[in-house]
Image: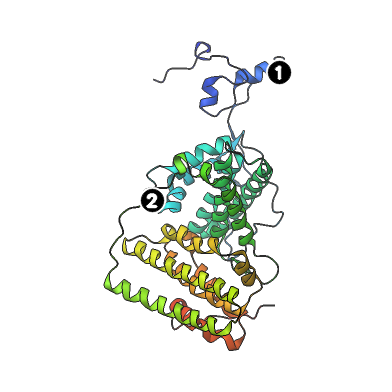
Amino acid sequence: MAKKLTCKQCDEKKPTCTNCRQHAVICDYATESAAPSRPSRRQYRFKQSKYENQRDSPTTDTSVRLFSPGPTPPPPLESISLADLHLFHHFVTSTASTVTDGQDPKHLWDIHVPQWGFAFPSILHLILAFSALDLAHQHPALRTQYLDQADAHFTFGVRSVTTVLASLNEDNCQYIYISAVLICLVYFGHGPRTGEFLVFSETGQAEWLVLMRGVKSILESRHAEIFSGVLAPEALEGEAQVSEELAEELERHKGRIRDVQLLIRGEMSDPAIKEMYDSALECLQNTFDEVYRMRAAGKQGVNLMHLVIGWLYRLSERFVGWLEAKDPLALAVLAYWAILLKYMQSSWLMTGWHEHVLAGIQASLPEEHRSWIRWPVECIFGDRQPVIAELS
């Protein structure tokens, strides 16, 4: 039988005793000290959730509601509902492993990040949002219920991290960075959104691009402090030998990229612009090399995230501006990058993104320029003809 905690075991430190602080619970002693005239009964407890009695209603709605006002966000989790406890349990036992494809020797996502959530509420709400999206993907009949939960927690998670961005320091930078990463993962987990293609959109600034710039800003401010401790990079393993079949496939991709490079050099007379495109295309070829080495080692899905998204991260702001303006040559380059998204389809996070991004590129290109992306279209759609809706 577990030994009961008695008053003798409480060191009565103020404002919170050591035991309560270590277990991340509200300290009855602290409450009594602050308000001695009122009996203290505050503890973590189960409460009724509006989601528990909600009628199940399947839906085919795939719209992302990340940036709408959305439902009223839940309060800080001093009380936790059974519905939220279910989301938390699902995250630590299932969803966390999908972030790393089950390869997380430091237990960052199933142990450390959930623990950080008790010190930094944004993380806790964002992992609950992420877990709800995973459950929505697994249980289509309950999609509406889980999306409502995801939206509520996402709204509160974003609001709470936004309030501390101005006070980014060495003590909270890892928490803020993980919050930003979770926001990006939630965006992918919601699935493709009509009119939004990661780095360009039908109108205005692309939503995901705003998120990526936020992560970039955080990293540039506190890179050394962020990638320390449990977030320190793993030592690189030996490179896997790429099979002859994969090597031939890789060379076909790189040959087509070099063709685009020659095309652009012929189209552009400004040396600075040529250099901008050359840099992006050389980096893209290197990314293909790295992705194929990972594939040769049997790693796909989310294992490729840092490589594939890393190419976008390293693009110059000038090139990104051309993508946002839907410049035909810049979009053609992006189409070849979209091929890499195909190799991430084993992850529920990335389902359909390769087709969505390429369809958006094709719809944005004038008819006379669509021949430039014939190879990406063949790689992603094969014999199927993508549905191209002209963008406004």
Pick the residue in front: 300 or 68: 300
Q: Measured along the vertical axis of the image, is residue 382 above or below residue 115?
A: below
Pick the residue in front: 294 or 55: 294
The residue beneath circle 1 is 35
Q: Mark 2 is on which residue type?
A: Gly
Q: In which quarter of the image is the C terminus?
A: bottom right
The residue beneath circle 2 is 102
Q: Mark 1 is on which residue type?
A: Ala
Image mark for residue 193: none
Does the image show residue 30? yes
Q: In which quarter of the image is the N terminus?
A: top left
Does the image show residue 195? no
Circle nearer the N terminus (2, 1)? 1
Q: Measured along the vertical axis of the image, is residue 245 above or below residue 213?
A: below
| Callout 1: SS | loop
Judge depth for marks 2 and 1 and give the one in front: 2
Pick the residue in front: 337 or 150: 337
Determine which quarter of the picture holds residue 24: top right
Q: How crowded is mark 1: few (under 14 residues within 10 Å), some or many (20 or more)?
A: few
- Residue 95, image x and y in percent? 46, 50
Q: Measured along the vertical axis of the image, is residue 299 above or below residue 392?
A: above
> Does 144 sit left or right of 244 as displayed?
right
- Residue 359, image x and y in percent? 56, 76
